[in-house]
Amino acid sequence: MDSLITAAARALAAGDPLGALKRIALRDDAPALALRGIAMAQLGDLARAKALLRAAARAFGPREAVARARCAVAEAEIALASRDLGWSAQALDAARVTLEQHGDRLNAAHARYLEVRRLVLIGRLDQAERALAALDPAPFPAASRAVHELVVAGIAIRRLRTKPARDALARAERAARDAHIPALTAEVESAARILDAPAARLITRGEQRLLLLEDVEALLASKAFIVDACRNVVRDGGKLVSLAKRPVLFALARALGEAWPGDVARDTLVARAFGAKLANASHRARLRVEMGRLRKALRALADVSATKLGFALAPRRARQVVVLARPVEEEHSAVLAFLADGESWSSSALALALAASQRTVQRALDALAAAGKVQAFGRGRAQRWTTPPVPGFATTLLLPAPLPTD
């Protein structure tokens, strides 16, 4: 490796892509193409970066397995940054194995971190934790240690474990400071702000207030009866009833929870559950059927009884009923929650993360675009969607990983 390539690689490792390009911008040999691709990725031109890395992989040839594997890892990182979550995990794993076999432990670990971060984004936290447990960041450079702690913090945040998250972010801050990479420091600071932003709303006895993540954690550990509108479940201590696939029943449960200890009029329940402005005999008959189903679903946690006015909820053990809702609620809020991280997402990546069909996601994006809430750029498979984050709200906490039940 010649001196210019070495100097460019050192500049990239220090987070100085312009310094790297000054040395290799006019070269088109394989090492220079790879470094130019990484530099363009750091500068945000992900499409150009991807093309350069693929050209570098072809130029290296079959005998330079380590170099080709490094290009594959870099391309996977670009895919992750552009929220193209459909890339082949097998290809990344093959590159990691190649790097491990040739003694490149640092880049092999980086490949594993990329896979862990992808698993976190799509809500597969158990798999992410198992993969992360196989990594010891102690012998790695400061930048890699910071990435490790950011991943640890991301999992802890989605698990609603605020103290481990704060501890991991403190370690990440120290490592980022030692690495002297401004972009990495900014990423750590952005992650830390999540813990100090409202993560949910508490609705009880007709009043509302915003909750931080640690408040949500404390609430879930309390003895309150919780109608959780973030995950469409009903909780009472260690018991949980999921109504995620029964939206009508959850709408009724939420209406009863918001009105507790009072009751809710039948016409109000019809409007909340069925969207009817004027209730007729058919709606009231259907309401009786759905209330019977709700009573059966919640029989271990609460009683749903008829009153003169309508229906009321009475928990069997808890002395308080609360509704836990998103800080901002509107149609297609789950799609907006992903887009609010400031990154550009493809519709296929959103479908994978939301565990929904791509057509369903595309309809939601079209509706949001018509309302001016999201915007698209690119065409066909290169089309990406983005929106500015909602100021002051921890929107990344709305990702679809299940909240803890214990």
Image: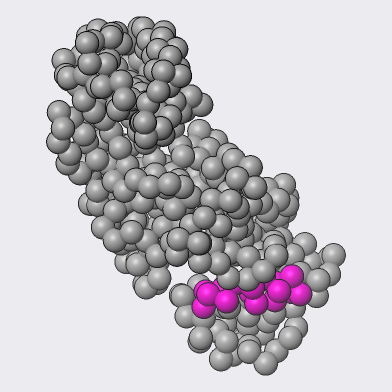
Image position of 82 (left or right of 231): right
Going 72% across and 47% down the picture, which residue do you hit?
Answer: 90
The answer to which of 388 and 341 lies nearer the viewer is 388
For residue 108, above or below residue 245: below
- Is 55 covered by the magenta stretch? yes
- Where does residue 395 sit, x and y in percent of width and height? 36, 51
Residue 211: x and y in percent read 21, 42
Magenta span dominant secondary structure: helix
Q: Is residue 344 above or below residue 299?
A: below
Q: Quadrant of the N terminus?
A: bottom right
Magenta residues, as a range? 41-56
Question: Of all residues shown, which one is farthest toward the right?
Answer: 62
Q: Is residue 197 above or below residue 46?
A: above
Closest to the observer: 302 or 149?
302
Q: Residue at x 30, y 37 (%)?
A: 325
- Judge whether residue 305 can be spotted in this image: yes
**Was residue 288 drawn as part of the magenta stretch in this picture?**
no
